[in-house]
Structure formats: C-alpha cells, structure tokens
Image (cartoon, rainbow, N blue to C red):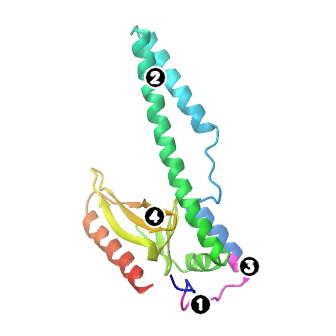
Amino acid sequence: MNQNPYPNANWTMNEQQLNQTGQALYSYCHVMREPRLGAAPILITVLTGLAMTLIIAALGESLLLAVGLGAILIALFGFLFWLAYRYRVGASQRLNSYLAVDGGRMMITDFAFAQPFVNDQFRLGRYFLFIRNGAVLRIDGIVDVVKIPGRSGGGVSVIHADQNGRKSFAICMLQPLGGWPVYEEIRREVMQRRWQG
C-alpha cells in the first residue's frame, strides 16, 4: 500500500463542516466504533422460544415436541442475531482502521461529495463506499460486485478484502423489473472507481 492512502485528495472542508458531515455520515451508516450485542436480542430470543413452547403445549401437543420446537426457534433466532452482530463487528473494524489513518478526515470529506445510488441505498465516493444502515468500505478493497438473485428483484453485494479479512456486504435491493441493468450499472461504476483509485 502507498504511504499516502489518499493521493490527490482535496482538503477543502473546515472543522465545522467536517463535524457536521461526520454526524451526517454516522447517521447515514449507523456504524459504531464499538458494536454491542445488548440484552434485547437475548431476551427476544428466549421469550420467543418460550412463547412457542407454551403455545404448542397449549394446543395439546406433547411437552417434548413443544420444547424441541421452542429450542429450534431459539437456536434460529440466536444464529440470526449472531450473524447481525458479526456484520456489525466487521463494519466497526473497518471504520476504526479508517479513523486511525487521519482521524477519518478523508472518509468524512469523501462522504460529503459521494454520489447516491438506487434511491440512496448506498453512496459511492472517490475512495469509499457508504452503505445506508451498514458499513463504510474502502473502494480499493472491493474484490467483486455480485448480484444476489431473489423473487422480489434480488440485491447487490460487494466482496471486500483488507487487513480485517474478506467479507461480503449487501449494498442495496433491486426492483423486480429492470434489476439486471441496474446491477450492471452499479458494478461498472464501483469497479471503475476501484481501478481509478
């Protein structure tokens, strides 16, 4: 990697503008420096499993079946919460590494001029990709842009690799009709920025 990770960067924002744009960036992405799991997901998981157990038992099924289905539901919810937490950890590791370079100054400046895509589900800057309610990613770490097929149009993800590991990040959902041309446009724009950076 080059000594200067932001060649030809244009530092035109004063401190007040940086602070305001930084707040807008964190509000847009909702990425945290230190992600927390909290008690709510654990409580929701246990109560949902317990409620399912009680409902099945109340319907006259055997207690063993009710407990088994409740345990499966607890395991499923627990796995989904773990995946969401793992995503947040990956996003925060990347954010912290960007903040370590220059206090986040270039990342924040890049956000101010980033181009919105697909109803502003993500924004593409010169050096960073900003995902609404998701991660901030260095564009030079993007390995590929892939379409995830689905009945309702599917979605688009980027494969990102850096010192924090290799991870897939969903960047947007596509409309059922016309999804393929939109995906092609997104892929072209992201990969062009990747090779220009």
Read off the magenta span: 7-18
Task: Choose between 161 and 189: the one closer to the eye.
Answer: 161
Q: Are marks 4 and 1 in contact (CB under 8 Å)?
A: no
Camera-near label (2 vs 4) is 2
Q: Earlier in the sequence, mark 2 or mark 1?
A: 1
- Provide the major secondary structure of the magenta segment: loop
Q: Are marks 4 and 3 in contact (CB under 8 Å)?
A: no
Camera-near label (1 vs 3) is 1
Q: Is residue 113 visible?
A: yes
Kindly identify which numbered label has been placed on residue 121. 4
Q: CA distance from mark 4 to mark 1?
A: 26 Å
Q: Earlier in the sequence, mark 2 or mark 3?
A: 3
Quadrant housing the C terminus? bottom left
Magenta highlight on residue 38: no
Where 68 sits versus 119, above or below? above
Q: CA distance from mark 2 to mark 1?
A: 57 Å
The amino acid pointed to by label 4 is Gln
Q: Earlier in the sequence, mark 2 or mark 4?
A: 2
Instruction: Report the residue marked by disc 1.
Output: 10
Q: CA distance from mark 4 to mark 3?
A: 26 Å
Instruction: Report the residue marked by disc 3.
Output: 16
Q: CA distance from mark 2 to mark 3?
A: 53 Å
Kindly identify which numbered label has been placed on residue 180. none
The amino acid pointed to by label 3 is Gln
Instruction: Report the residue marked by disc 2.
Output: 70
**Local secondary structure at mark 1:** loop
